[in-house]
Image: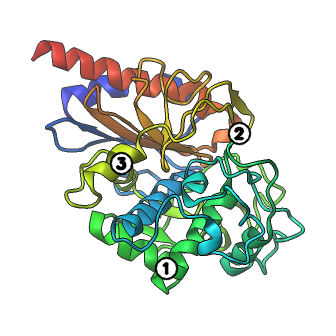
Amino acid sequence: MSQFMARLKADIEEPLRIARVPGLVLAVAREGQPVEQLVIGVDAVGTPLAQDSLFPVASITKLATALAVLRLRDDGALRLDDPIVRYLPEAAAAQPGVTVRKLLCHTAGLPTDVSANLAPYTARLSWPILARACLETELSHRPATLVLYSNVGYGLLGEIVERQMGQPFAQALRELVMDPLEVEAYLGVPHRPTARVADVRSSHHGTDLEPYNSDFWLSLALPYGGLVTTMEGALALVQAFNGKAEEFLRTTTLLEATRNQAGELAGRSGLLQWPFCPWGLGPELRDAKTPHWSPPEASAESFGHAGASGCLAWCDSSAGVAWAFHGARVADTGWLLRRGAAIGAAILKRVGEESRQN
């Protein structure tokens, strides 16, 4: 373990203990340095974590889905400012002003999730049923009036990718994103065990339908939340928006994807509300949001994505660093919001110290 990572471990072990997170895997990429990883503790059932532990990364999946859309854009298969009626003519959301771009930055006017009436959470649920539910979901407000974080919007993007590629979304995602980035990732039940996360707050906790931890949940292969990958994989996804994957996306596309697409709109993500909510073409932009799971020390232009299963992937190119971590406890216990920023602050502090020493 490098001195940098040893110091970082000392910084975050106590906050994790206080947050009752049994274990965590962290991957850090500093400019000009190979990726380094830190492994602490065990998963929710006591299995020791490892650098190659697979985690259900929840909404970090949206980074992968956005990358798939952007690659199709670069290939000329779609245009961001096309109305979605061109690709999904039967969608209830295919209304004036609803474009691919607005789906990517959560300004299309869609609700957060599909109604349980359209897709009951039972053992019969599948991605095709959820895709149909997304197509049947109507707008909850006028487009371009609010940033409302929406799984439905990314469900529709998944359906667009399927139709443009002529293959199931999981297969299309592998071809467009995972294989080119050389990432070990699965949309569906993986070929090896997945780390389990603690304190899942669901009526299905402890059953065969438990979110994140069950094969049933993984089998849904959700374009907005079903990806399973390592922390090095999660790091590769956020770094792909920073041009770290050569010839993966055009430079102009990368600049556009990490620039605010939401204007001056206010926004809401779960229980969090911000009077100004910049968002890119997939990644969330830091700006001055508070509270937040990334640290206030991060640059306003830094970007990334959180996941409700207890994870964050973030890139601060101004500081020359990107990081991804997953703790073995779900985010809605509050630990990610309270401690995730502290982890990022520790990383930026140690990067700054090394920079000054050099």
Q: Nearer the viewer, residue 116 or 207?
A: 116
Task: Rate crowding at label 3 as few (under 14), some (14 to 19) or many (20 or more) other CA atoms within 10 Å.
Answer: many
Foreground disc of the pair 1, 3: 1
Between discs 2 and 1, the one toward the N terminus? 2
Task: Give the SS element for disc 1.
Answer: helix
Q: Nearer the viewer, residue 100 or 152?
A: 100
**Is residue 16 something one can see in this rendering?**
no
Residue 143: give its label.
none
Between discs 1 and 3, the one toward the N terminus? 1
* Mark 2–mark 1 CB contact (< 8 Å): no
* Mark 2–mark 3 CB contact (< 8 Å): no
Calculate the distance from the C-alpha at mark 2 to the C-alpha at mark 3: 29 Å
Q: Relative to 60, is 290 above or below?
A: above
Q: Relative to 29, is 226 above or below?
A: below
Q: Relative to 136, is 35 above or below?
A: above
Which quadrant of the rendered structure holds the C terminus? top left
The residue that appears at 35% across and 57% down in the rendered structure is: 52
The amino acid type, in three-letter code, at marker 3 is: Leu
Residue ID for mark 1? 164
The residue that appears at 44% across and 51% down in the rendered structure is: 48
Residue 146: give its label.
2
Task: Rate crowding at label 2 as few (under 14), some (14 to 19) or many (20 or more) other CA atoms within 10 Å.
Answer: many
Instruction: In the displayed orientation, state which residue is furthest to the front.
Output: 96
Q: Nearer the viewer, residue 231 or 3?
A: 231
Residue ID for mark 3? 235
The amino acid type, in three-letter code, at marker 2 is: Leu
**Residue 272 placed where, x, y %?**
70, 31
Calculate the distance from the C-alpha at mark 1 to the C-alpha at mark 3: 27 Å
**Residue 109 placed where, x, y %?**
73, 50
